Image: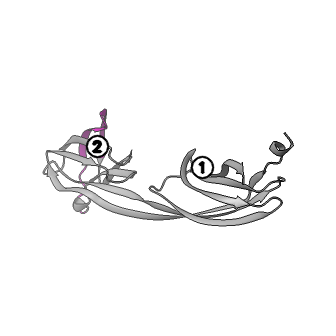
Amino acid sequence: MYQNSLQPNIQVTAVDISTIKNPNDSVVVNLGRVYDSGKFSYTAEQAGTYVLVFTNIYNILMPYSKRVSVTYSVDGKSYTQSFEIREYFAIPLKLTKGQSTSGSFTVRGGFNNDVDFYIEAHTGTQSLTFSFTLVNSGVANGFAVVVLQADGKEIWSNRYFVQAGQQVDVSGKAILPDLDEHDLKIEVAQQQKA
């Protein structure tokens, strides 16, 4: 029984996490000038914000208003929106990798019932660098499995040996596959006597 009470007590201290965002903005669908009506479809290759863009900028010298009605879906859920456009109108969508959007729109107004249409992707990754100290205040040497979590999901882990009454300084790197804000946390997931 005395042997069982001799356990490590390994805690994470001095946590520092830095994030560098690596954006990648691009046009993933470009229908160009569309007369009367148009259709679009796209499946996201990466998680991010995708924007349905309607422009009338080519008519900037004669900015006639156009009336656009669009119906679009994101993974089966449909949305309808009508708006007047003089220069530019954007509809942002959050898509995860593999999610699809598709739809159709009609244009009325101006000389030709026309508008330019494209889908713009705001995607990218985040590079994380982190450091922390593992402190063993217990009376036995031990191993600790440390995890880095983003919104409660594990994105990195490693196992460390920490002697009784000692500390170990650790640093590492990880990548997040999006540009979203996340709740980042480093903690000891499990520990055991060495």
Q: Is residue 83 magenta?
A: yes
Spot occupied by residue 86 in the image (x, y as percentages of width and height): 29, 52
Residue 11 higher or lower than 167, as above or below: above
Instruction: Please report the bounds of the magenta region as a residue range.
Output: 61-84
Spot occupied by residue 153 in the image (x, y as percentages of width and height): 54, 46
- Is the residue marked by circle 2 packed among few (<14), some (14-19), or many (20+) residues within 10 Å? many
Residue at horizontal 38%, vertical 46%? Answer: 96
Which residue is denoted by mark 2 in the rendering? 101
Q: Are marks 2 and 1 in contact (CB under 8 Å)?
A: no
Element under disc 1: loop
> In this image, 183 relative to 134: left or right?
left
- The front one of 126 and 26 is 126
Q: Point out the image quarter for the N terminus.
A: top right
Q: Nearer the viewer, mark 2 or mark 1?
A: 1
Spot occupied by residue 111 in the image (x, y as percentages of width and height): 14, 51
> In this image, 42 relative to 24: left or right?
left
Residue at horizontal 75%, vertical 53%? Answer: 11
Please tell me in which quadrant of the rendered image residue 5 appears: top right
Label at residue 8: none
- How would you classify the magenta stretch by its main secondary structure? strand
Which residue is denoted by mark 1 in the rendering? 183
Residue 29 higher or lower than 103, as above or below: below
